[in-house]
Structures are given as structure tokens and as C-alpha cells.
């Protein structure tokens, strides 16, 4: 028989794990697995705060696709349209003309993007925290602001440079805030011009609690720990404007801030708007518990989805509940989906995905954390250790596991790197200035 072609759209948690499992379980005579993603790597997002804080090398928080998916065909490009009625996807390679790729099965896993609001000034002054590029930029930016504050005699400039605003009190926001404050406080030992109290770290959260994935008492403990570090926690407060870097909050307060980090939720990738797959009211692809795409009562043959962009019923809860957009579900859904595709390719029936959420772990900086796993609650060092242990076990490949452990081990003996590499963001500026043509007037002079 001719081998089936399985097209994997996106190489995030779902795409990478599913493609890896498919390539191991299906022979080349049974199927060809094609993975399309514009990035040459998968980012293990739970490690972004540690990468930004310098606890691990940024390169060790990403997994190279071509190294891990050696039995798959990797296409560097973006899927711009999917016409499932013809089982065809249009791909825009990173260079060159578009091409069409036909398939027998498609895994729709483009993931999510930051869910933003039409807040004046956010587009011009905000930065997200979903990619390795954003994590590296934030690290360099925070350290650069310390240099600015140490060098300027202007009190207003210093105050603005040392005010760091984070919007969103979920896991991404709390971990980014806590890790970056920990890093900046550590860096201040090299800045005799600055004191820890000169820094202002602000968390803006629209609801009345942080970390909604854990019980209220654990969220309250997290707030207490952040307050002990003199952070400014604004619950039940919204960002209304940040035009020209002036943060205006719904509680009436306003202040200048050179750093505005937006971590207030995610939404399905807009790429899904250019497909003919059924969507729910939150623009997620509608799925059965088997991870098959479903249109009403009709199964869309050959279409599968999981992760942040999919509405997957949670069979461990009452009807009407869906799996949360977490890495914990994404990794397990990817495995179940890959196994189901293997079953279908071999003429058997798929199996429902069912997983009770095990809990959550969060880092609050070096040696500090909060965890709630299978009903067991931990705080401080034990929670931090569990956070590291769990995520080290989940990042793909033995290579990355070893490198992350080595980074952590070296951190026990060596001081944290706190140098900003701001030139990474505009590397040609100095050369462009040096290579400007000399004008006739300049020669004459």
C-alpha cells in the first residue's frame, strides 16, 4: 500500500511530541510525517523565566527540530491556508514561492498567541513573554535599565527606568515577575549607585487573585511572598493606558514605566482563520475526546487537533468543561493523538483522551516556589525543587535534560551572569554607521 502522509502544522508541545511518537510507531511503509514550522526549534515555554533570569542558557530551553525529528520531513515555513475539503495545505517557505502540500491526515497545532486588548500605547510599548526572543529581549532590557538608572543624574529618568510593570497574574506573569526581580536584585551588587528600594516591581491583575490554577490559599501565599519582597501587587485592577510609557490603572494611579510586560492570557493562533475547520465561540477547533476534529455531530475525517488551539472535552469533569491550555495537557494529548492516528492508519478505532489535571508548580525565583500536586501543597524550597525536577523530566531529549542539569549545577558554584547583550537586537547598527559613504563635503573639509 502507499504510505499515508501525515502533515503536522506547528512544532510546539503538541506538534513535536506527536511527530516524534508517530515517527517511532509507524514505519516508512505506513506513513510519511511532514512537520511545518517557521522556527527551527520547539520552545519549552516553562523554562522561559529561567532562561530570562540567566539560570539556564537560552539555547538549552529550545529543542532543535531536525536533530529530534530525524525520521520526519521538516519544512521551514508557515502554513498560510488549509483547505481540508481537498486535503491540501498552502505553505509559505521562509524563502521562495508558496507551495501546496497534500495529506491524508493533518494535525492542526499552531498553538496560541498573546491575547491583547485595544489598550492605548500597548502596541508601541508592551512586550509579550511567549517566545525565546521575548525572554532574551526582556533580560537584556531589564539589565540595560539598571545601567541607565546608574548613569543618569535625572531622578525622573531613574525612577522610570527602575519601574517594571507586569500585566497578568497567571503562571507566566508570576514566574516572569519573580524571576526577573530575583535577577535584578542579584545584579544590584555590582551597582553601588543603586539600592534595592530604588526598584519598583508592579503586578497588575484584573481579577481578585493570582494563579487561578491552584487553591486560593496558595494564591494568597504567593501574593504574601511577593509583598515581602516589596513588590506592588494590584489585584482587581486593569491597565487602561500606557501611552508614551505612562501607565494608567483603573484604580486611578499613574506612573512612568520603561518596562511593560503583557502576560494576560492567550488566544488560538490567527492562522486558524484561514482554514475550513469548525470553531467554537472562543475560536478554538472543536474536537472529540479522541482528539479528532468534529463539526457538530460529524467527525471530520483525517483532521486532528490538540493543545492551546483546540477545544477538547475534559472527561474528568462535568460535561461542558474543556481541558485547560497547559503544557501538562498538551504533552499528554499529543501522545494520545499520535497513538490514535496509528490506530486509524491500521484500521482500528481511536481511544478517548482522559487525564485528571495533576496540579501545578511555579517558581518564585531562586530557591522559592509554590506547588499543588495531587492535592498536596508545598511552599518554598521543596516547591521550587519539585518545579525544577518536573520540568527537567518533561523537556524533550536526553541532550537537553543533561544541559539543563549542568546549567543548574554550575549555578551552585558560580555567580549568575548579569551582563546585558543589547547589541543582539540591532547588530548592524555599528557597522552601518561605520560603512556610511563619505560625502564630498566631508572630503573637502
Image: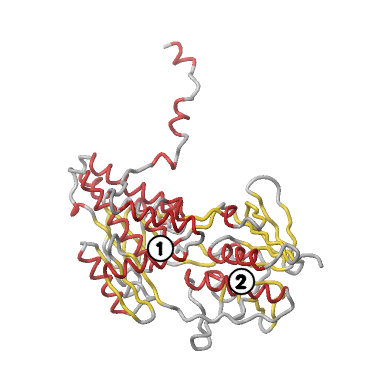
What residue sits right under mark 1 in the picture? 263
From mark 1 to mark 2, how far is it between C-alphas?
A: 24 Å
Q: Quadrant of residue 292?
A: bottom right
The one of 97 and 65 positioned closer to us in this rendering? 65
Outermost residue toward the bottom in this view? 318
Q: Earlier in the sequence, mark 1 or mark 2?
A: 1
Whether residue 425 sits left or right of residue 156 in the image: it is right
Q: Dot 1: what SS?
A: loop
Side (left or right) of 347 relative to 195: right
Q: Which residue is under mark 2? A: 305
Q: State the residue at coordinates (41%, 68%).
A: 390
Badge 1 density bin: few <14, some 14–19, many ≥20, Cα 10 Å: many
Residue 251 is situated, as x and y percent measured from the top left of the image, at 28, 68
Query: Residue at horizontal 57%, vertical 70%?
Result: 334
Please identify the residue farthest to the top as the structure is shown.
444
Q: Nearer the viewer, residue 118 or 339?
A: 339
Look at the picture and state if 318 lies above or below 23.
Answer: below
Residue 145 circle label: none
Is 176 placed above or below 317 here?
Answer: above
Residue 183 horizontal/vertical position (percent): 29, 53
- Is there a contact, CB below 8 Å, between mark 1 and mark 2? no
Give coordinates of residue 271: x percent, y percent: 60, 62
Quadrant including the C terminus: top left
Locate the N terminus by quadrant: bottom right
Residue at image position (47%, 60%) is 44
- Foreground mark, 1 or 2, reads 2
What number of labels is visible?
Answer: 2
Residue 287, image quadrant: bottom right
Would residue 234 appear left or right of 106 to someone viewing this image? left
Amino acid at each position: 500500500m502507499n504510505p499515508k502522509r501525515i502533515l503536522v502544522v506547528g512544532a510546539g508541545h503538541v506538534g513535536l511530541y506527536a511527530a516524534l511518537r508517530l515517527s517511532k510507531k509507524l514505519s516508512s511503509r505506513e506513513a510519511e510525517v511532514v512537520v511545518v514550522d517557521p522556527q527551527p526549534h520547539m520552545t519549552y515555554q516553562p523554562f522561559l523565566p529561567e532562561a530570562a533570569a540567566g539560570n539556564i542558557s537560552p539555547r538549552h530551553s529550545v529543542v532543535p527540530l531536525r536533530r529530534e525529528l530525524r525520521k520526519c520531513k521538516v519544512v521551514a515555513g508557515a502554513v498560510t491556508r488549509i483547505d481540508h475539503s481537498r486535503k491540501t495545505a498552502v505553505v509559505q517557505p521562509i524563502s521562495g514561492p508558496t507551495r501546496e502540500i497534500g495529506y491524508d491526515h493533518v494535525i492542526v497545532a499552531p498553538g496560541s498567541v498573546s491575547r491583547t486588548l485595544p489598550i492605548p500605547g500597548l502596541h508601541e510599548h508592551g512586550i509579550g513573554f511567549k517566545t525565546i526572543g521575548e525572554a532574551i529581549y526582556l533580560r537584556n532590557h531589564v539589565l540595560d535599565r539598571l545601567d541607565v538608572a546608574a548613569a543618569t543624574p535625572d531622578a525622573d529618568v531613574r525612577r522610570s527606568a527602575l519601574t517594571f510593570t507586569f500585566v497578568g497574574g497567571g503562571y507566566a506573569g508570576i514566574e516572569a515577575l519573580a524571576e526577573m526581580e530575583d535577577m535584578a536584585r542579584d545584579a544590584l551588587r555590582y551597582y553601588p549607585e543603586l539600592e534595592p528600594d530604588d526598584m519598583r516591581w508592579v503586578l497588575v491583575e484584573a481579577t481578585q487573585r493570582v494563579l487561578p490554577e491552584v487553591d486560593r490559599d496558595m494564591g494568597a501565599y504567593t501574593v504574601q511572598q511577593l509583598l515581602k519582597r516589596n513588590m506592588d501587587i494590584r489585584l482587581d485592577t486593569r491597565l487602561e493606558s500606557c501611552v508614551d510609557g505612562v501607565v494608567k490603572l483603573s484604580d486611578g494611579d499613574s506612573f512612568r514605566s520603561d518596562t511593560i510586560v503583557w502576560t494576560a492570557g492567550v488566544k488560538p493562533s490567527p492562522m486558524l482563520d484561514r482554514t475550513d475547520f469548525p470553531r467554537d465561540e472562543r475560536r478554538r477547533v472543536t474536537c472529540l475526546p479522541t482528539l479528532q476534529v468534529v463539526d457538530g455531530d460529524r467527525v471530520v475525517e483525517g483532521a486532528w487537533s490538540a493543545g492551546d488551539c483546540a477545544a477538547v472535552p475534559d472527561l474528568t469533569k462535568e460535561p461542558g468543561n474543556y481541558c485547560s491550555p497547559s503544557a501538562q495537557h498538551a504533552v499528554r494529548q499529543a501522545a494520545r493523538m499520535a497513538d490514535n492516528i496509528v490506530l486509524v492508519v491500521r484500521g482500528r478505532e481511536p481511544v478517548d483522551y482522559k487525564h485528571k489535571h495533576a496540579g501545578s508548580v511555579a517558581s518564585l525565583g531562586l530557591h522559592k516556589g509554590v506547588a499543588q500536586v495531587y492535592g498536596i501543597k508545598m511552599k518554598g524550597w521543596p516547591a521550587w525543587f519539585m518545579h525544577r525536577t518536573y520540568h527537567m523530566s518533561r523537556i524533550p531529549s536526553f541532550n537537553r535534560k543533561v544541559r539543563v542539569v549542568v546549567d543548574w549545577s554550575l549555578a551552585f558554584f558560580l555567580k549568575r551572569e548579569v551582563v546585558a547583550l543589547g547589541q543582539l537586537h540591532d547588530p548592524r547598527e555599528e557597522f552601518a554607521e561605520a560603512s556610511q559613504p563619505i560625502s564630498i563635503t566631508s572630503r573637502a573639509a
